[in-house]
Image (tube, rainbow, N blue to C red):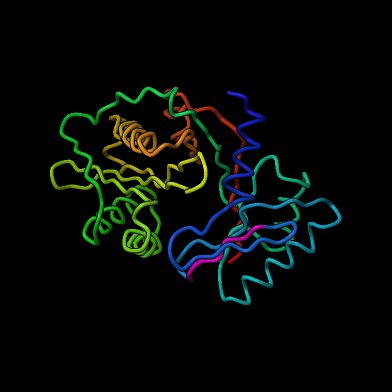
Amino acid sequence: MDHAAVLALFDRETREGARPEGPGTRVERGARVVRRIGAAHGWNGIVWSDLDESTADEAIAEQIRCFTGLGREFEWKLYGHDLPADLGERLRAAGFAPEPEETVMVAEIAGLALDVEPPEGIRLVPVTDATGVDLVADVHTKAFGTDSTWLRHQLQAQLIDDPDHVVVVVALAGDEPVSSARLELVPGTGFAGLWGGGTVPHWRGRGIYRALVAHRARIAASRGYRHLQVDATDRSRPILARLGFEALTTTTPYLFL
């Protein structure tokens, strides 16, 4: 992989060229910042910036005014190659709190090994209605230990209003939901995003996550996408590397609550 070329393409198509993510969202483009504004329970934040030492502080202050004026909590999605080099320090000084750093991993779908099947006793079921969304939310709560209300609202809205651009899958052991994940298909780009992959603790280490990656990759390939992108935790990064993903950059969510 030509990392520099893929990184430039990733920035141009998915960040600077960001599109609304589901119903009720909009993208606003300024000269130096691109922000996505959604519902109060959805994702709100900064997806791209082109700043330097002379413009960063005012741009940060402007985004705080914008989102607080809307009554929104929001995130500045900072990437490892974003400038200025001290942008993270400037965000902390302005009141943002960093979450754990993740690794942006990318793969060309054509180069992936996709003949991965779920372990015995596990079936992958597409999520198409509120009952399925409840199963996904249950997995999310158990896998990540966080409230899943926002996810339930987001998935229900996407499946109703934008079903062509999101694929949601739940892994069942009998009738028990043990893992789930979604695939977000970004129209007009060559990138499809793998999001939300999580497995409940007592089912980890059995190959379910790997099977969900391969399942979603096959779907993305069938719809003409060239690349897959994942914001990988330390837990998922080794699995993705074994499947053929490569580290492109890092990303750190900076939250303003």
Determine the image quadrant of residue 147.
bottom left
Tell me if residue 105 is in the magenta stretch: no
Q: Quadrant of the N terminus?
A: top right
Farthest-out residue, left: 174
> Is 115 above or below relative to 46?
above
Which residue is at the front of the view, 47 or 166? 166
User: Which residues are drawn in magenta?
Assistant: 34-39
> Is 154 above or below relative to 227?
below
Q: Quadrant of the C terminus?
A: bottom right
Q: Position of residue 248 (x, y in %)?
A: 59, 32
> Is 34 above or below relative to 211?
below
Residue 182 falls left or right of residue 32: left
Task: Please name the residue shown 62% across and 73% down the image.
Answer: 68
Task: Please name the residue shown 46% across and 24% down the image.
Answer: 244
Q: Position of residue 205 (x, y in %)?
A: 32, 31
Residue 72 falls left or right of residue 180: right
Prevailing secondary structure of the magenta residues: strand
Count of numbered marks = 0
Residue 14 falls left or right of residue 220: right
Task: Please name the residue shown 52% across and 33% down the image.
Answer: 106
Q: Position of residue 217 (x, y in %)?
A: 37, 34
Determine the image quadrant of residue 132.
bottom left
Task: Please name the residue shown 42% across and 48% down the image.
Answer: 184
Farthest-out residue, right: 54
Tell me if residue 38 is in the magenta stretch: yes
